[in-house]
């Protein structure tokens, strides 16, 4: 056997061994990594700035909708059109309650204070928001995003009662996750507030190198929210993703969550 043949066989066997351990180099829908673009709080710029930017490059994003947002009431047909084009309308609860008992939560109003809720009220309002979203987009499958990243009411994890209502739930903790490691009850993400395109593209490169999931959490894009990313910075990120589309899987959270659920070993599934 020539040395070249020997090395070829070794390389093939090493490849099989890696795959057997779930270490494929292209684990994300046959691409190197997955990138999910999420936009929170149902604001006007989602429709005015984000959707035209995504649609121009044929990317699909996830919009986490607060059912009581006036932008839902005023622009139902725009949200419906976005969903018909393949964007996800995710659930960000009916009233966006956050835990007002935590430090730095002076912005939480008495009526939207999650620390004054019961678990049943939190769960019922989130289910009512699902009904509203289904009335808009006709879909029964979507993901949830925790308002303010708050997981508990009175020390109880309220999402435990909602696991069968959603494909997954996005949190606010930063990090990259492999298919096997992703906790679908609290999916990690990077919240963007004023960072440059270079920073965001750097995150994408890290995801490509580590074969992991990268979730972006945006609020305002070119204004519209006190947490914001510049329009040009956002556009540069999208164009980088487009340029590398052959190796990056860009998809709505619901598609990626369903993919993870299908491909995780049974023992990891929560
Ligand atoms: Zn929010």
Image (cartoon, rainbow, N blue to C red):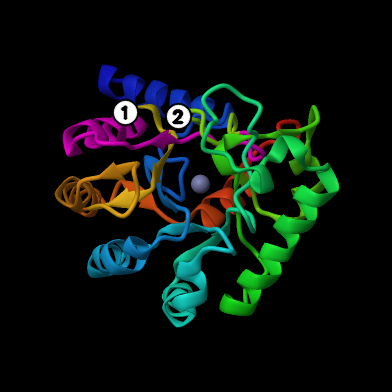
Q: Do the residues labelled 1 and 2 touch (CB within 8 Å)?
A: yes
User: Which corner quadrant holds the C terminus?
Assistant: top right
The residue carrying mark 2 is 176
Which comes sooner in the sequence, label 1 or label 2? 2
| Nearest the eye: 252 or 47 | 47
Q: Which circle marks residue 114 in the picture?
A: none
**Residue 269, position as x, y percentages in the image:** 73, 37
Task: Sort mark 1 into few (<14), some (14-19) or many (20+) by Cα contacts within 10 Å.
Answer: some
In the rendered image, the residue lying farthest to the bottom is 77
> Which residue is located at x 80 percent, y 27 percent?
155
Q: Quadrant of residue 138?
A: bottom right
> Which residue is located at x 47 percent, y 26 percent?
13
**Residue 193, position as x, y percentages in the image:** 31, 36
Work out whether residue 270 can be spotted.
no
Is 213 situated above or below 9? below
Q: Is mark 2 on a helix, strand or loop?
A: loop
**Residue 50, position as x, y percentages in the image:** 30, 61
The number of numbered badges drawn on the structure is 2
The residue carrying mark 1 is 206
What is the magenta range? 183-208
User: Is residue 108 rendered to the left or right of residue 218?
Assistant: right
């Amino acid at each position: 056997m020539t040395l070249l043949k020997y090395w070829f066989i070794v390389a093939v066997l090493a490849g099989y061994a890696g795959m057997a351990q779930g270490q494929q180099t292209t684990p994300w829908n046959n691409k190197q990594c997955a990138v999910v673009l999420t936009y929170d709080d149902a604001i006007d710029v989602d429709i005015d700035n984000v959707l035209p930017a995504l649609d121009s490059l044929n990317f699909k994003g996830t919009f986490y909708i607060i059912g009581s947002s006036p932008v839902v009431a005023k622009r139902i047909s725009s949200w419906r059109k976005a969903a018909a084009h393949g964007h996800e309308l995710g659930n960000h609860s009916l009233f966006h309650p956050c835990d007002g008992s935590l430090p730095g939560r002076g912005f939480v109003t008495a009526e939207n204070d999650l620390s004054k809720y019961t678990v049943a009220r939190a769960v019922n309002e989130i289910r009512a928001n699902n009904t509203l979203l289904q009335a808009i987009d006709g879909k029964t499958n979507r993901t949830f995003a925790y308002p303010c990243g708050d997981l508990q009411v009175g020390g109880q994890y309220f999402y435990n009662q909602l696991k069968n209502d959603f494909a997954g739930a996005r949190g606010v903790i930063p990090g990259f996750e492999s298919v096997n490691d992703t906790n679908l009850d609290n999916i990690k993400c990077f919240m963007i507030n004023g960072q440059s395109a270079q920073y965001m593209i750097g995150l994408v490169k890290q995801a490509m190198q580590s074969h992991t999931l990268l979730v972006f959490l945006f609020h305002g894009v070119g204004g519209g929210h006190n947490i914001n990313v510049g329009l040009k910075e956002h556009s540069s990120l999208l164009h980088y993703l487009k340029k590398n589309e052959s190796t990056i899987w860009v998809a709505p959270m619901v598609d990626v969550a369903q993919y993870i659920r299908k491909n995780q070993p049974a023992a990891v599934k929560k």
